[in-house]
């Protein structure tokens, strides 16, 4: 028996942010020693919303440089672009034949657009392409193609992994054989939902993100934009539920947290001071990674070389899965 498999993907749809780091990248890299790790760039998923070729390419390299900056080792971790593993798209077609349409109707991302359209009295399917509608099937293919046991992600992805597990079980039951491994999500409670500048989930789609690799100056400017209430400097403030304090906890130890908590409760601390404290901790944590990121992003041929090597190995693994499936399904 080999090691269990951990797999996750990130879409190149925007600049990587601290929600991506705590929700997916950090837990994924922590698994890399004990698991057979397979981490990829979900560029075909990105195509649903990102259709500008140059931008897609630029963001793909940004995501790749991010993984490398935080320590992904391409020698021991399979590292690839989804688009370079064509078996993914064959598996998507195969899975589609076993996926009830109702699963797609219930998927959160699609439902959110329909809800918005309803509210704004537009046609229900306005702005919905088939890529968005069948998004969970492509994601199931990413996962099932690589014999995945565990998928480190943020909470927003939980439903997608449940759908992948359901599809795998349906297929195993149909053929009365364990041909697809049934995956489980890994969602850490403390980092399952990182808050953005406006107190909602940090997300590229809400434009409320704190980028991982902004310059110190821009990081500071971004942090100063965190939305707060209008309490005056002298008023005591409640750290619980405060976006600034919640973010501060991610970058500090218990003693530092208690210190800031006291300053909140004592009064005399303005929001600007709390933001300054957050900026200092965040900047201190991020600056060594920022340096590495800047080195990698300036060396696209190094990134390309590593991806291409990973993609060769990824296709070999994928082809084994597809051969098994084609055989059992009666295509061979
Ligand atoms: P976004 O929502 O900004 O478009 P992605 O969908 O590309 O981000 O997410 C990539 C990974 O990062 C996923 O595993 C997702 O769950 C995780 N993630 C994104 N935003 C957050 C967040 N605010 N908190 C925790 N995890 C997050
Ligand atoms: N849907 C994920 C997101 O929006 C990205 C993704 C695509 C993914 N395929 C995956 C994550 C497979 C985990 C496993 O963040």
Image: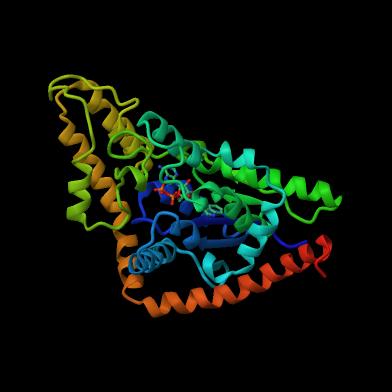
Q: Position of residue 94 (x, y in %)?
A: 70, 58
Q: Is residue 167 left or right of residue 239?
A: right
Query: Which quadrant of the rendered structure holds the C terminus?
Result: bottom right
Residue drawn at x 48%, y 64% is 72
The answer to whether residue 16 is visible is yes
Q: Quadrant of residue 161?
A: top right
Looking at the image, the residue that sits furthest to the right is 176
Residue drawn at x 32%, y 33% is 199
Q: Is residue 42 left or right of residue 320?
A: left
* Residue closer to the observer: 6 or 51: 51
Image: 147 above or below 186: below
Query: Which quadrant of the rendered structure holds the N terminus?
Result: bottom right
* Residue closer to the observer: 136 or 219: 136
Report the colour scheme: rainbow
* Residue closer to the observer: 263 or 283: 283
The answer to whether residue 34 is visible is no
Q: Position of residue 164 (x, y in %)?
A: 65, 47
Q: Quadrant of residue 66?
A: bottom left
Q: How many marks?
A: 0
Q: Quadrant of residue 147?
A: bottom right
Residue drawn at x 35%, y 77% is 299
Looking at the image, the residue that sits furthest to the top is 235
Residue drawn at x 81%, y 60% is 329
Looking at the image, the residue that sits furthest to the front is 123
Q: Is residue 182 left or right of residue 237?
A: right
Q: Is residue 188 left or right of residue 278?
A: right
Q: Position of residue 221 (x, y in %)?
A: 17, 47
């Amino acid at each position: 028996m080999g090691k269990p498999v951990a797999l996750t993907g990130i879409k190149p749809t925007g600049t990587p942010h601290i929600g991506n780091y705590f929700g997916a990248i950090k837990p994924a890299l922590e698994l890399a020693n004990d698991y057979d790790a397979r981490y990829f760039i979900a560029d075909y998923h990105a195509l649903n919303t990102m259709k500008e070729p140059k931008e897609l390419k630029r963001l793909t390299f940004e995501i790749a440089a991010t993984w490398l900056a935080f320590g992904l080792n391409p020698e021991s971790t399979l590292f690839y672009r989804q688009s370079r593993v064509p078996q993914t798209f064959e598996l998507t077609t195969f899975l589609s034949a076993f996926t009830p349409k109702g699963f797609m109707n219930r998927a959160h991302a699609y439902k959110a657009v329909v809800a918005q359209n309803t509210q704004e009295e537009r046609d229900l399917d306005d702005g919905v392409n088939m890529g968005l509608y069948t998004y969970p099937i492509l994601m199931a293919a990413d996962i099932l193609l690589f014999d995945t046991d565990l998928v480190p992600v943020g909470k927003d992805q939980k439903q997608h992994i449940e759908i992948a597990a359901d599809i795998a079980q349906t297929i195993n039951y149909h053929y009365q054989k364990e041909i697809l491994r049934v995956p489980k999500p890994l969602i850490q409670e403390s980092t399952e939902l990182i808050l953005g500048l406006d107190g909602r989930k940090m997300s590229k789609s809400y434009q409320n993100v704190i980028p991982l690799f902004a310059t110190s100056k821009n990081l500071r400017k971004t942090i100063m934009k965190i939305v707060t209430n209008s309490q005056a400097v002298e008023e005591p403030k409640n750290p619980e539920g405060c976006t600034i304090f919640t973010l501060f906890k991610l970058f500090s130890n218990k003693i530092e947290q208690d210190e800031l908590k006291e300053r909140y409760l004592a009064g005399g601390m303005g929001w600007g001071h709390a933001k300054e404290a957050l900026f200092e901790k965040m900047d201190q944590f991020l600056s060594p990674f920022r340096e590495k990121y800047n080195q990698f992003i300036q060396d696209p041929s190094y990134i390309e070389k590593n991806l291409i090597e990973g993609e060769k190995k990824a296709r070999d693994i994928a082809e084994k899965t597809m051969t098994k499936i084609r055989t059992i399904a009666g295509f061979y």
